[in-house]
Structure formats: C-alpha cells, structure tokens
Image (tube, rainbow, N blue to C red):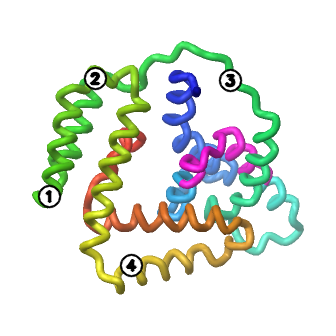
Amino acid sequence: MTDHTEWVYNYFNYFTEIEEHFQRARGTSLFLLSPLDWALIESWKDSGVPLEAVLRGIDTAFEKWRSRRLKTQMVNSLAFCAQAVLSEAQVMAGTRQARPSRETKPPFESEELRAYLRFNASALPPEFHEIRATLELLAAGVDRYRTDLETLEQRLTVLEEKMLALVRARHSDDEMLAARQELDRQLRPYRAKMTAEQIAMLEKQYLERHLLEKAGLPRLSLFYMR
C-alpha cells in the first residue's frame, strides 16, 4: 500500500511541478498552459505516470527539438512531449524504487480546507443541492481529514463524477460534438505521438473540463486549492 506521506508528496506537487518544468524547458516563464495541456496532465496523473517520468520526458523532448537543424515552429503544447513521457514511464515501470518515507507537514490547514469546501458548496446552483449538502458536511467534519487527504480527495472525486453526470444530461448532442471537434483540431498535430489509450484518457479529461467550465461549475479536487 502507498505510504500516506508519499501520496501527499506526489499528488500535490504533480501539476505545479510539471507546469513550471515545462515553462523552464521552453524558456518562457510566462507561457500559459492550454485546456488541452491541463487535461493531458490530469490524464497522466490518473494513469499513474510518475512525476519523474513526466519531467524526464519533457527534457528529452526538448533536447530532441533543440538538436534539429530546422525548427519550423515553437513548442506550444505539452502534447509535443507525450511520446517521450510515455517512453520514460515505461522505463521507470521496471526500475523504479520506492522513495524513502519522509515526514511531511499536511499541506493544508483545517481552516483552509473548510473554506475551500464551503466556497465550492456556495458556488453550486440549486439543482446540485445534494452535492452542496455533502460538501457542507465534509466542511463541518474536515478535522478528521486533515491528515488523511487521500480519503477526502476520493470523496470529492465521487461528488465531481455525480456533478458531471448532471451536467452531461443538460448538454445537447450538438454542443458535445462541437467540443469534440475542437479537441480533435488541437490534437491533430500530436496524435502520432500518443497511444490510443493516451488519446482516450486525454479526450475524457478534456471533455469533462470543458463541461464544467462551460457550466460555470467549480472543480472539487483539492489540487485546485493551489
């Protein structure tokens, strides 16, 4: 079983470290990741791709790009690194050793967690009243989760899945088709760098993010406290 401190170390550093590492590799600290990029990071996280594999993959992809004689365009998406990240993950799968256990301070104080949960509850419209009530209950009993963020994150994931199911029912086929066509347009230059499984996961994450953003609903994961 994964050590709790190891879970906290990996999970809450995952997105920010990847974003900052990509910006450094690209040489433009003000570069903003796109919705496609964020969905790709989320798909790596959910697939269990180690943070180290992503960082190494980014470095490898940029090393290859810089070695080209002709650089027809700048690297404008993390998707450019997808193939290298997959290769690094496969290498690490057979060689990775467990990180030594470390003492880690819980990344959030109880009041921070409580405020975050209550803010998200207040952001939900009336038709999401059951999810809002559950968030309020979690906020009221948040002290029990301060040192067990993994369980709290799992509960929030379940709530977000319920929220997504309600949002999907409100969207027309035409709206979903338009979102998928936009995703296909953005993915077209990078499809050859990804496996079918990667593309399927990325499509899922991208469309879910699109649905929630279009509906003006908050993301519930603790990562979005950052």
Query: How far apart are the alpha carbons under marks 2 and 1?
Result: 25 Å
Range covered by the magenta-colored residues: 43-60
**For the residue marked with disc 3, what is the amino acid?**
Arg
The numbered mark at residue 125 is: 1
Q: Position of residue 164 (x, y in %)?
A: 32, 61
The answer to which image quadrant residue 14 occupies is top right
Q: Is residue 186 left or right of residue 135?
A: right
The numbered mark at residue 81 is: none
Residue drawn at point x = 58 percent, y = 27 percent:
2
Query: How far apart are the alpha carbons under marks 4 and 3?
Result: 42 Å
**For the residue marked with disc 1, what is the amino acid?**
Pro
Whether tag 3 and tag 2 are in contact, CB under 8 A, the answer is no
Residue drawn at point x = 27 percent, y = 66 percent:
167
The numbered mark at residue 176 is: 4
Query: How far apart are the alpha carbons under marks 2 and 4?
Result: 38 Å
Residue identified by numbered label 2: 110
Q: Position of residue 121 (x, y in %)?
A: 18, 45
Mark with earlier residue (1, 4): 1
Q: Position of residue 143 (x, y in %)?
A: 27, 21
How packed is label 4: few (under 14 Cα within 10 Å), some, or many (20 or more)?
A: some
Query: How far apart are the alpha carbons under marks 3 and 2?
Result: 27 Å
Q: Is residue 159 left or right of residue 223?
A: left
Mark with earlier residue (4, 3): 3
Residue drawn at point x = 43 percent, y = 32 percent:
150
Mark with earlier residue (2, 1): 2
**For the residue marked with disc 4, what is the amino acid?**
Met
